[in-house]
Image: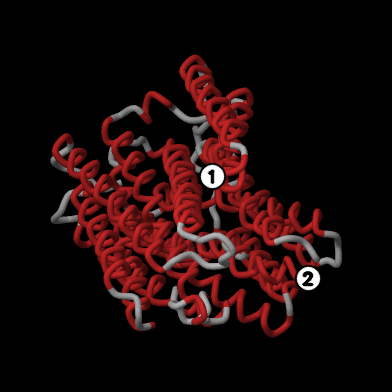
Amino acid sequence: MEALPAARREARPLVPALMFIALVVAAIASLGTPLITSVATSFHVSLGSAQWTLTVALLSGAVATPVLGRLGAGPHRRAAILATLAVVVAGGALTVLPLPFAWLLAGRAAQGVGLGLTALMMGVARDHLPEERGAAVIALISVVSIIGAGVGYPLAALLAEIGGVRTAYGFGLAVTAAALLTAWRSIPEAPEGRSAHVDVAGAVVLAAALLLVLFLAGERDLWSRHPAVAAGLAVVAVVLLCVWAVVELRSTTPLIDVRAVRHPAVAGANLAMFVGGIGMYLLLTLVTRYAQTPHGAGYGFGLTTFVAGLVLVPFSVLGFVAGKLTPRIRTRIAGPLLLAGSAVVVGGGFALFAAARSDLAELFAAMGVLGFGVGGFSAAMPGVILAVTPKSETSSAMSFNYVVRSVGYSLGSAIGGLILAAGTGPGRLFPDDGAYTTAALVGIGAMAITTLASLALARRRPSTTGP
């Protein structure tokens, strides 16, 4: 009789700790976005070079996530969490110290490793919380990992305006140090009897493939100036992914259980996450860029980086609201249907942006709709995957889903940039207003595909149980 009250007492400090760590690593990884211009000015580098302060964090996060997911399935999960946060803190120190630009990139790469912790937070919640409470917390961790960008963007922009880029990165160092202390005090050891060996060969091949995929997604100039080279690298990336799949199928201790990933529920959820991720990040990119476009372009609002960041506030607030509501709704509606409904809501955000964006309030409305849809989608996703996943494989299964999400986000950003670049006339700095409409229509198409994939998954799996 004492076990349940003891579990509840343990849950009280554990739940906010998991939320805080997930929020911090997501916000820190997104710090590169609002600081790109400040970095270019402070370090006297091009905007393209400064863009790598964001890209390198996403790259390192995508590479680290499956490795950390496998470590999280083993007996040393707590040590893996603490060591990863220590790496993130060390990276934060490199971004603050008065060192050359190359060291800043190294620091940002170290900070990006923290993105792999989200799946481990889910594994801790599933192991140490009662089933119903664990499902709700896992859903919120998934949402927090998304809305962290909305929290970090305006805050980083404000700090950069007040004290410069080092001040903004200094805040990142402070909160990651707080996250490390929180983890040290609150994260319990993994249950006994677990074992996990990292497939080094699989990790190396997957890392190479992901590096190529995300590099190609971020290097838009390469596609326009050297399409043959870009296409060749894309072929190499596909070949590496095929080699990786073969290596994993033959390994007795695979980095990611490819056979489990082939389960219809998991495969369908990852497909929906991939296409949905393209659409979600596409709209996020469009709205913030549109808000900062000066009036001289014939549209836009000429907002500063900080004020444009405030446009993300409705995204974060309504995303959190949807994350809180989704576990309750999921007791009546199957997870795949929630994914489909959330995709429709995100598509509605695109439609709103395409039809009405002449007033700043309309941008806030579009971002609110996007946030609610993304929050619901993110909260429903873990339940669909974990319903067919053993507890011991929680971190590994979700880490693969987050790799898929990272690739989708990167492609969404790249597609948005390509559409806007195609809509920019010769000698002009800004694209035509119609290019934004075209990008929004592409986003609607992506969310339509996501909706259909989710409905197909619902027909295959008519009922879903919680994780």
Location of residue 418 with respect to 399 vertically, above or below: below
Residue 42 image label? 2
Label 2 neighbour load within 10 Å: few <14, some 14-19, many 20+: few
Residue at the (32%, 64%) spot, across then down: 323
Q: Amino acid at mark 1?
A: Ala
Q: Amino acid at mark 2?
A: Ser
Query: Where's residue 78, x and y in %?
Result: 59, 48
Judged from this view, the residue extending furthest toward the front is 426
Q: Is residue 6 something one can see in this rendering?
A: no
Give yes or no for contact between labels 2 and 1 (Cβ–Cβ under 8 Å): no
Residue at the (47%, 58%) spot, across then down: 420
Please name the residue that numbered disc 1 is placed on. 217
Q: In terms of depth relative to the viewer, which is nearer, 315 or 428?
A: 428
Give SS at disc 2. helix
Judged from this view, the residue extending furthest toward the right is 99
Q: In terms of depth relative to the viewer, which is nearer, 283 or 377?
A: 283
Label 1 neighbour load within 10 Å: few <14, some 14-19, many 20+: many
Query: Where's residue 303, x and y in %?
Result: 52, 81
Residue at the (38%, 61%) spot, across then down: 140
Q: In terms of depth relative to the viewer, which is nearer, 414 or 116?
A: 414
